[in-house]
């Protein structure tokens, strides 16, 4: 933390975002003790959140691995019914994301996330016993509704417990679990789909075992996740007191006493930055859902015709995605910049897609292109949401803003099964062309958003120079609340 404004009620005109994020309690903080308790928070909170997201993401995307088996044949799927089954989960997922975000404080994090975990685990387990397309659609629709509570609420909890310059790296820890789930899912699918018994096929064992694994996380979530971080059972009294002081210092960003007001929701609709984030997120999530769902088939289309080869070759791709993502998240928090990193990883995706779209590219080059896409796979998704959260203050405005961005973005998941059509497998050239267009759009909108933020910060600094008061209760309208670029 930057102590440069600890004794000033109003920062100078050139005050930085680092300065603005600090509060009046700076001199009272033992920084060494604070860092120790933050690391303890990471070990306990982020571990639980990572496990929740790992299994929820795995249980939502494992249908891609199942499709490499007799799944479609056993359920008698015809035409693009598999693509429809992939997409329909997002019909309810996108609708419920902003709802769960708003209800997080009302229902409490412990109850909401534990119940969600139990519900999606039961539905995953139930997928093992669906008998036709209609059954599959019903299960997938319900799965989307209950899983919508996980990642939006995890991120809102991070904004309740951490400082703004700590969001990205914590989000990367959680999102890296999605990359791990991709690698883990490929290995698990390799083993489980080879099990054949008299009454069950390999894909049924895949859903059954993964559903049971998810159930195991529910009691851990209930006992280990506090509704407020300064109430955690794994903290000592002194650590709770230190965290309480840290939360008071952060009230300009998150005030636990804030009550719901419709005016905070209305502010989102009047903020042009939210629309830029949301539309860009649609383009970003096109990459996320296309690659995570169809990667096994895309890799198979490179010439690796063996199901085993295609599943195992996804593992190093996800490993690179996780490693690059952790590095990018750490760097983004370190320099307190979002848009340059976001544009950078989107350019990596764009180059990868262009190579995949070239028919004459050698197999090795196209496999390398999958790695380039993977570099931006989770980094872009996370950074855009982190950027949205950093620049919206007031819990309910932030909750609705991030929920709205994710609603629009995740609608890409609802569309992706109809863009990457089964009839165009395994190269999915039409879908890849669409992804190229969406990635270009996301890059352009991110650049425009960065320009808007720079202009807004310039105006705020002018207000500070003219003697504007520091009013944390105004949230992001406070002249001293400088936006992250």
Image (cartoon, rainbow, N blue to C red):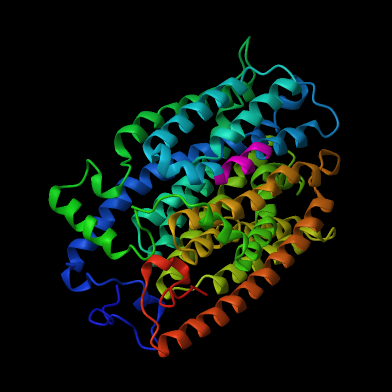
Taking 293 as reference, is 116 above or below it?
A: above
Q: Residue furthest left?
A: 238
Specify whether residue 315 is in view: yes
Place of residue 289 in the rendered image (x, y in percent of width and height, measured from the top left): 66, 47
Span colored in magenta: 91-98
Instruction: Let me know if residue 95 is in the magenta part.
Output: yes
Place of residue 4 in the rendered image (x, y in percent of width and height, measured from the top left): 28, 82
Place of residue 151 in the rendered image (x, y in percent of width and height, measured from the top left): 50, 46
Q: Nearer the viewer, residue 250 or 81?
A: 250
Place of residue 269 in the rendered image (x, y in percent of width and height, measured from the top left): 62, 60
Specify whether residue 309 is in view: no
Taking 160 as reference, is 28 above or below it?
A: below
Left or right, 225 with respect to 393, comes to left
Left or right, 215 with respect to 204, comes to left
Taking 236 as reference, is 249 above or below it?
A: below
For the point 65% across and 53% down, the residue is 409
Q: Quadrant of the N terminus?
A: bottom left
For the point 37% across and 72% down, the residue is 471
Instruction: Let me know if residue 417 is in the magenta part.
Output: no
Taking 460 as reference, is 97 above or below it?
A: above
Q: Which secondary structure is most common in the magenta stretch?
A: helix
Left or right, 132 with respect to 276, comes to right
Left or right, 150 with respect to 160, comes to right
For the point 73% across and 66% down, the residue is 441
For the point 47% across and 88% down, the residue is 462
Q: Nearer the viewer, residue 373 or 396?
A: 396
């Amino acid at each position: 933390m930057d102590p440069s404004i600890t004794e000033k009620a109003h920062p100078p005109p050139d005050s930085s975002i680092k300065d603005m994020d600090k509060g009046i309690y700076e001199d009272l903080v033992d920084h060494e003790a604070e860092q120790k308790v933050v690391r303890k928070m990471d070990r306990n909170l982020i571990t639980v959140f990572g496990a929740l997201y790992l299994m929820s993401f795995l249980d939502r995307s494992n249908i891609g691995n199942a499709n490499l088996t007799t799944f479609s044949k056993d359920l008698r799927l015809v035409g693009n019914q598999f693509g429809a089954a992939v997409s329909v989960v997002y019909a309810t997922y996108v609708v419920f994301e902003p709802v769960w975000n708003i209800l997080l404080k009302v229902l409490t994090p412990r109850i909401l996330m534990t119940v969600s975990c139990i519900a999606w685990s039961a539905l995953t387990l139930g997928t093992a016993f669906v008998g036709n397309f209609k059954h599959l659609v019903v299960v997938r629709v319900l799965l989307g509704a209950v899983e919508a509570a996980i990642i939006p609420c995890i991120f809102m909890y991070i904004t309740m417990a951490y400082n703004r310059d700590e969001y990205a790296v914590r989000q990367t820890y959680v999102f890296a679990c999605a990359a791990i789930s991709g690698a883990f899912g490929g290995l698990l699918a390799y083993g489980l789909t080879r099990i054949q018994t008299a009454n069950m096929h390999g894909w049924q064992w895949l859903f059954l075992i993964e559903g049971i694994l998810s159930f195991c996380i529910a009691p851990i979530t209930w006992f280990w996740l506090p509704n407020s971080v300064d109430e955690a059972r794994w903290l000592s009294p002194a650590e709770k007191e230190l965290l309480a002081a840290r939360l008071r210092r952060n009230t300009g960003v998150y005030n636990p006493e804030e009550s719901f007001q419709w005016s905070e929701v209305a502010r989102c609709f009047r903020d042009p930055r939210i629309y830029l984030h949301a539309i860009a997120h649609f383009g970003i999530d096109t990459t996320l859902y296309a690659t995570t769902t169809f990667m096994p088939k895309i890799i198979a289309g490179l010439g690796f015709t063996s199901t085993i080869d295609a599943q195992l070759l996804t593992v190093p791709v996800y490993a690179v995605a996780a490693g690059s993502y952790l590095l990018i998240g750490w760097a983004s928090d370190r320099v307190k910049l979002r848009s340059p990193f976001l544009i950078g990883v989107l350019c990596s995706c764009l180059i990868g897609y262009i190579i995949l779209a070239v028919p004459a590219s050698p197999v090795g080059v196209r496999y390398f292109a999958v790695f380039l896409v993977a570099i931006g796979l989770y980094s872009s998704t996370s950074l855009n949401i982190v950027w949205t959260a950093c620049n919206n203050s007031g819990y309910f405005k932030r909750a609705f803003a991030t929920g709205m961005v994710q609603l629009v973005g995740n609608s890409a998941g609802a569309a992706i099964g109809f863009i990457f059509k089964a009839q165009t497998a395994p190269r999915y050239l039409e879908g890849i062309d669409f992804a190229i267009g969406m990635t270009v759009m996301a890059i352009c909108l991110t650049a425009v958003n960065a320009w808007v933020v720079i202009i807004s910060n310039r105006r705020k600094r002018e207000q500070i120079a003219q003697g504007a008061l520091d009013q944390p209760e105004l949230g992001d309208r406070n002249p001293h609340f400088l936006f992250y670029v």
